[in-house]
Image (cartoon, rainbow, N blue to C red):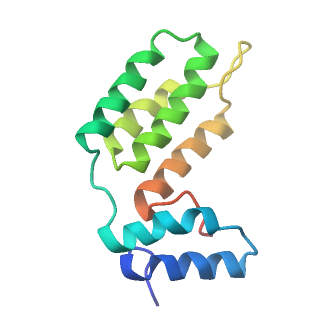
């Protein structure tokens, strides 16, 4: 059995998963191939960290509902560059839904799972 963490086989596994599940994975293949060659990021580069910090600072200026949606996007961006602590810090900012909008609990769960898949395998593909 081949594990998902086997970087060298990741593009092949992604293609196989797409074939079995009739899923479109073409857009994710370049990321999987890069990860196979270089490995998954273990943390952000200086440029990514600067960009994430700027995005995070910008969240404070947003209305509540917009802040929740944008926090989800920043969390996913942090996951893409391997910044796990930023993802964990941002998840509570997605908040629960209320009469003013924002993300409901299902969306919050989706953000967490999306970030987890991205950190663990490099792409946001539901592997089950």
Q: Position of residue 9 (x, y in %)?
A: 43, 82
Residue lying farthest to the left in this orientation = 46
Of residues 92 and 60, which is closer to you in this image?
60
123 with respect to 127 (left or right) = left
Residue lying farthest to the bottom in this orientation = 1
86 with respect to 12 (left or right) = left
Of residues 89 and 80, which is closer to you in this image?
80
Q: How many marks?
A: 0
Q: Is residue 15 above or below residue 49?
A: below
Q: Position of residue 7 (x, y in %)?
A: 37, 76
Q: Is residue 62 above or below residue 92?
A: above
Which residue shows up at 76% across the image and 75% down it? 22
Note whether residue 95 is visible: no
Of residues 109 and 72, which is closer to you in this image?
72
Which residue shows up at 44% across the image and 72% down it? 33
16 with respect to 81 (left or right) = right
Which residue shows up at 31% across the image and 67% down it? 39
Note whether residue 47 is visible: yes
Q: Position of residue 112 (x, y in %)?
A: 52, 44
Which residue shows up at 44% across the image and 61% down it? 122
Task: Examine the image and state in which quarter residue 58 appears.
Answer: top left
Task: Examine the image and state in which quarter residue 96 appears.
Answer: top right
Quarter of the image that includes the C terminus: bottom right
Task: Examine the image and state in which quarter residue 89 appears.
Answer: top left
């Amino acid at each position: 059995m081949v594990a998902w963490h086997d970087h060298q086989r990741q593009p092949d596994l992604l293609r196989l998963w797409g074939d079995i599940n009739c899923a479109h994975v073409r857009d994710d293949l370049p990321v999987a191939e890069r990860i196979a060659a270089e490995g998954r990021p273990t943390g952000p580069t200086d440029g990514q960290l600067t960009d994430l910090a700027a995005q995070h600072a910008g969240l404070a200026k947003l209305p509540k509902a917009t802040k929740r949606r944008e926090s989800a996007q920043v969390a996913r961006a942090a996951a893409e560059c391997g910044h796990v602590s930023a993802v964990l810090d941002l998840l509570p900012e997605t908040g629960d839904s209320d009469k003013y909008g924002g993300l409901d609990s299902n969306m919050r769960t989706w953000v967490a799972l999306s970030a987890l898949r991205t950190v663990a395998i490099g792409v946001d593909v539901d592997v089950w």
